[in-house]
Image (spheres, grey):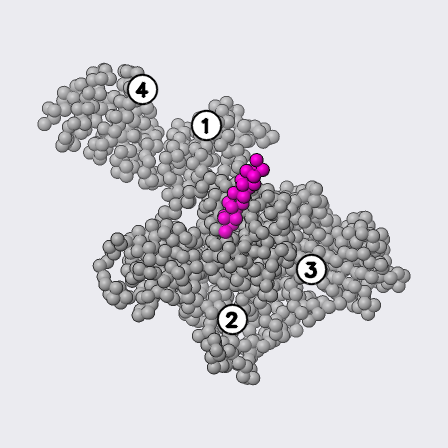
């Protein structure tokens, strides 16, 4: 039998409850600092928003979540005024709730299928997740999971981004010894170098890393696997029983147009890494320099493009977005687009950069674009941008190219047994996430070529389960072998 | 009204365990006690705490536990009385009274804290109060943390010792996770600093408390390390002569240090120290370093490079490696002070550590057997970078000629090392103060005139590499140059190091650093190297002030 709801309302009444918006910092205020933009729900708002959930018998939202969080269950706990229990519930399937509540594209996943959304705005699942996670952090209600006895198996995790961290967690709670190898001096991968602090405060990541350390996951920094140790070294001489590759999509795509190598033209990766990993915003106290002028052009309209624009704005620039399609096709999360719009970014939709014009010192001075128009929808319903032959030129002194990434080639290039496809993406078995090399599994952007934090976590979870089966199955084999020998 | 308790109270005064027990049984049966009655009973019961000279110890212990519980259950009605008793009690009774008070949980803590305020300065009372706190197991006892921390700085060694002991007990009993990180940290620091106290009593208690904190696993790895090394030193096992002279302190440490035997973790094996083993000056503002980095030393190949961050606020800079010793686990680098970061590095001394070193990065240099002569050319401190490749070219049977270019004699470096790696070395200086007068191209031309050159490697300033490439282009002599583009991560992630090679964009960090010199767009490289010239100037100026 199902528990009674806190508020005695009919489904119809619930659907008509007003959607609660998180309180945001004012746009004028927030472009002056790197503080987080939404302040979050207060208790009443969270309970009210949770009351909007219909507690469907066959919840679509769970199916739409890449890690399968029991969404109705945690929402119900919030409605009952038990946010700490809600956080615990989320942690059963997702150990990075504070990060996922902030960066998941909920409007394309759980919230897209929310039944309430058919009539009203969908339930703010991400905001509620964030509320529960923040409550847990604020009141320190986090409980450590019990780690079963050591299985004696050692697993090497390559990369400490969302995929690597999840795989580490999932394997550790099964009692394996886990070592995470990170190329940088700090763990978190894209969560550290690619996602701005005003979207995901850095303390959250550090706390999650600390949590992993406390449950016995070990981290080693400054280690580029493939260069300093090969996969064969790890699985051979170093004695690891399996490896997981979560190296991400660290190879920026760049425009192939004249002037693309001009000074002041960055990839979004470089721009964000300089600022967030290396803290160039505090130059010269922190020694990494950043050249940024007054007029910044950002090319692209995905999440990373929004992040770059809003970062440039915070560093005092006049920022313009150039995108060859229209706003409807912009791939960014709707919330990011909305926040960027509030922050007085200029928009040049249907503008395709064709040249970066430089001065004699190779510094960028102008961006030349061709005006595009959208074709009629093709068979797949997509509207293709078509050149019009009309051009315009804008002044600018910094360009950030945010055109997505390809898979980082270092690891596959150093191990021939790891098969990749034509786009450099590591090919894996769809069910187990095992690569073509025995005992090596992979997940995240390294096998998708670029996707979301939560999808990476979902794949890492699958891979971790397969690694566990692989290792424990292997033990059985050994026992059988020894029996046979007797 | 008080009739019913009078007889019981008089029984309590009888000096046999049996009678006292009977009295206790009778008290439990009483119902609806007034506050006045409770106080009277408490007064009589607490007397048990003071004279403990009857029965055998086991009986007494049981008796006292029962009594504590009985008084505790009277709750807040008797709190003021208990507090009054507490501040005047002897230390053993104080412990029992504290236990009674702890039954009132939060109210008890509040009452104790209030008494603490009131009796501030009365060390006798404060010691009892601190001791009483140790009985609490509810997390609210953390409210007392600031006062406890303050007491570790008291003038009285006894107050200090008691504060330490209570912190130790509380660490074991309550979940310190509930404490604010800052409080936890200052609590640790307070206890840790008392390891150096003048009084052995205080040091001994500090050792115990740290031991308990460690047992409860509430120390961070960093704190654990600090405690462990202090303990080692105090036992006189660190080779220095600052061991603790008091036996009782060392004895305590010997008990607890066993818990500290560092857990060998899997990751420890991979932690390279980046310790500077050796440093010497090659010429003005240019230093040669030998740094401990066993894993890099084991894997690095000629032509590969590393990225270095010398402090946690520093930038990541790419550096070429001029040698390594895989057995010793060290690599050698050369740093010339040109800006803020290199100047800061050159202030480091042997014994200091680099914060981070990543490598080996990039693709190794081309090394194969040629029919003709190989010429390796180093300009400025690029000389260091050509040595490993020269050595390997020679090792597989090539004739290798080294060419060094410098402005003047006093700027020449690594000459002997290069000589040991080549069949012949030609030195050129612009002012003619040593060797041939002119540029490296002067020497290259001479070599090309006298023998068949099949392979050239040039590392140094861009104009030099460009001049070399131009000279060999017509004769179609294979020429490689090593491009020192600006980099951030060195793994292909950012694209800062993009260079144009034969009209195509390449990343120096993963496709290079060596490229075919005849195809490199040197003009673009020079300009791109100046991307941050203003920022670098600003940083350098800030450094000099």
**Chain that bears disc 3:** B
Question: Could you tell me residue A250's position as x and y percent?
Answer: 57, 60
Residue B298 lies left or right of residue B472; in this view the side is left
* Real-space Cα separation, disc 1 to disc 2, in angstroms: 65 Å
Mark number displayed over residue B58: 4
- In the depicted structure, whether residue B176 falls above or below residue B461: above
The residue that mark 3 highlights is B513
In the depicted structure, whether residue A473 falls above or below residue B374: above
Name the residue: 28% across, 28% down: B97
Labelled pair 4, 2 in contact (Cβ < 8 Å): no
Q: Secondary structure at mark 1?
A: helix
Distance CA(mark 1)–CA(mark 4): 29 Å
Work out how far the residue at label 2 is from the one at label 3, CA to CA, in angstroms: 30 Å
Sequence-first disc among 1 and 3? 1
In the rendered image, residues at marks 4 and 2 fall on the same chain: no
Point out the stretch of residues depicted in magenta.
A466-486
Q: Residue B101's spot in the image, x, y percent?
A: 27, 32
User: Residue A38 magenta-drawn?
Assistant: no
Q: Is residue A323 above or below residue A181?
A: below
Q: Which mark is residue B204?
A: 1
Q: Is residue B324 visible?
A: yes
Judged from the image, the secondary structure of the residue bearing numbered disc 2 is loop
Instruction: Identify the residue at the far bottom of this view.
Output: A389
């Amino acid at each position: 039998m199902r528990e009674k709801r806190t508020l005695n309302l009919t489904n119809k009444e619930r659907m008509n409850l007003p959607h609660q918006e998180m309180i945001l910092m004012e746009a004028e205020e927030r472009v002056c600092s790197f503080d987080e933009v939404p302040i979050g729900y207060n208790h009443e708002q969270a309970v009210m928003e949770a009351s909007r959930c219909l507690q469907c018998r066959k919840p679509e939202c769970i199916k739409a979540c890449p890690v399968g969080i029991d969404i109705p269950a945690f929402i119900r706990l919030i409605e009952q005024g038990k946010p700490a229990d809600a956080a615990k519930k989320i942690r059963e399937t997702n150990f990075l709730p504070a990060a996922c509540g902030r960066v998941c594209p909920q409007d394309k996943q759980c919230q897209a299928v929310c039944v309430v959304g058919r009539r009203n705005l969908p339930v703010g699942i991400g905001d509620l997740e964030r509320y529960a996670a923040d409550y847990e952090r604020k009141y320190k209600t986090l409980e450590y999971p019990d780690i079963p006895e050591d299985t004696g198996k050692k697993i090497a995790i390559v990369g400490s981004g969302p995929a690597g961290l999840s795989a580490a967690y999932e394997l550790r709670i099964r009692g394996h010894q886990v070592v995470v190898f990170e190329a940088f001096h700090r763990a978190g991968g894209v969560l550290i170098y690619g996602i701005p602090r005003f979207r995901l405060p850095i303390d959250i990541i550090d706390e999650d890393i600390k949590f992993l350390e406390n449950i016995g996951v070990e981290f080693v920094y400054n280690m580029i696997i493939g260069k300093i140790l090969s996969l064969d070294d790890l699985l051979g001489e170093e004695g690891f029983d399996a490896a997981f590759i979560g190296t991400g999509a660290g190879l920026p795509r760049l425009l192939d147009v004249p002037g693309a190598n001009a000074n002041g033209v960055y990839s979004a990766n470089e721009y964000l890494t300089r600022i967030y990993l290396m803290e160039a915003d505090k130059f010269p106290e922190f020694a990494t320099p950043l050249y940024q002028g007054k007029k910044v052009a950002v090319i692209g309209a995905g999440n990373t493009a929004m992040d770059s624009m809003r970062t440039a704005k915070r560093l005092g620039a006049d920022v313009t977005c150039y995108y060859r399609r229209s706003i409807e096709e912009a791939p960014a999360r709707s919330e990011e687009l909305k926040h960027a719009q509030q922050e007085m970014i200029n928009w040049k939709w249907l503008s395709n950069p064709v040249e970066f014009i430089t001065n004699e010192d190779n510094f960028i001075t102008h961006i030349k674009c061709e005006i595009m128009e959208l074709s009629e929808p093709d068979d797949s319903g997509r509207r293709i941008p078509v050149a019009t032959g009309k051009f315009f030129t804008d002044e600018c002194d910094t360009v950030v190219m945010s055109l997505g990434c390809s898979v980082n080639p270092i690891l596959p290039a150093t191990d021939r047994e790891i098969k990749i496809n034509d786009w450099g993406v590591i090919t894996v078995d769809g069910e187990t996430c095992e690569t073509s090399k025995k005992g090596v599994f992979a997940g995240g952007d390294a096998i998708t070529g670029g996707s979301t934090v939560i999808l990476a976590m979902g794949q890492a979870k699958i891979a971790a389960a397969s690694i566990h089966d692989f290792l424990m199955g292997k033990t059985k084999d050994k026992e059988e072998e020894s029996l046979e020998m007797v | 009204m008080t009739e019913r308790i009078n007889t019981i109270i008089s029984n309590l005064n009888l000096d046999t365990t049996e009678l006292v027990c009977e009295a206790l049984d009778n008290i439990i049966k009483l119902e609806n006690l007034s506050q006045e009655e409770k106080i009277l009973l408490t007064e009589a019961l607490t007397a048990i705490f003071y004279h403990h000279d009857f029965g055998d110890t086991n009986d007494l212990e049981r008796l006292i536990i029962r009594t504590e519980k009985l008084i505790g259950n009277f709750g807040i009605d008797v709190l003021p009385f208990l507090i009054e008793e507490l501040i005047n009690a002897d230390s053993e009774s104080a412990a029992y009274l504290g236990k009674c008070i702890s039954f009132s949980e939060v109210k008890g803590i509040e009452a104790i804290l209030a008494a603490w305020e009131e009796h501030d300065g009365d060390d006798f009372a404060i010691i009892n109060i601190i001791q009483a706190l140790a009985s609490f197991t509810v997390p609210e006892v953390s409210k007392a943390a600031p006062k406890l921390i303050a007491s570790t700085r008291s003038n009285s060694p006894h107050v200090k010792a008691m504060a330490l002991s209570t912190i130790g007990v509380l660490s074991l009993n309550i979940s310190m996770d509930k404490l604010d990180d800052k409080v936890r940290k200052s609590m640790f620091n307070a206890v840790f600093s008392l390891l150096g106290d003048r009084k052995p009593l205080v040091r001994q208690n500090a050792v115990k408390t740290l031991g308990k904190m460690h047992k409860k696993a509430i120390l961070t790895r960093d704190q654990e390390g600090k405690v462990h090394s202090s303990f080692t030193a105090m036992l006189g096992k660190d080779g220095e002569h600052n061991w603790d002279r008091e036996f009782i302190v060392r004895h305590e440490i010997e008990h607890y240090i066993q818990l500290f035997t560092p857990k060998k973790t899997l990751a420890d094996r991979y932690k390279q120290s980046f310790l500077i083993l050796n440093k010497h000056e090659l010429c003005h503002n240019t230093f040669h370093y030998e740094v401990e980095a066993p894993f890099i030393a084991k894997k690095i190949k000629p032509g590969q490079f590393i990225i270095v961050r010398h402090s946690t606020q520093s930038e990541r800079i790419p550096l070429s490696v001029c040698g390594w010793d895989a057995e010793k686990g060290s690599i050698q680098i050369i740093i010339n002070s040109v800006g803020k970061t290199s100047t800061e590095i050159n202030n480091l001394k042997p014994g200091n550590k680099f914060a981070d070193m990543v490598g080996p990065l990039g693709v190794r240099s081309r090394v194969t057997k040629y029919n003709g002569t190989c010429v390796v050319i180093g300009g400025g401190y690029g000389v260091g970078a050509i040595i490993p490749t020269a050595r390997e070219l020679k090792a597989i049977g090539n004739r290798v000629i080294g060419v060094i270019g410098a402005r003047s004699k006093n700027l020449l470096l690594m000459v002997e090392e290069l000589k040991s790696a080549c069949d012949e070395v030609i030195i050129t200086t612009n002012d003619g103060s040593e060797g041939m007068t002119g540029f490296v191209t002067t020497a290259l031309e001479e070599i090309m005139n006298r023998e068949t050159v099949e392979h050239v490697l040039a590392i140094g300033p861009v104009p030099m590499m460009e001049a070399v490439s131009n000279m060999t282009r017509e004769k179609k002599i294979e020429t490689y140059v090593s491009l020192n583009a600006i980099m951030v991560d060195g793994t292909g992630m950012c694209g800062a190091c993009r260079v144009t090679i034969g009209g195509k964009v390449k990343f120096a960090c993963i496709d290079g650093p060596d490229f075919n010199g005849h195809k490199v767009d040197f003009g673009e490289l020079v300009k791109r190297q100046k991307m941050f010239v203003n920022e670098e100037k600003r940083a350098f100026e800030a450094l000099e002030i």
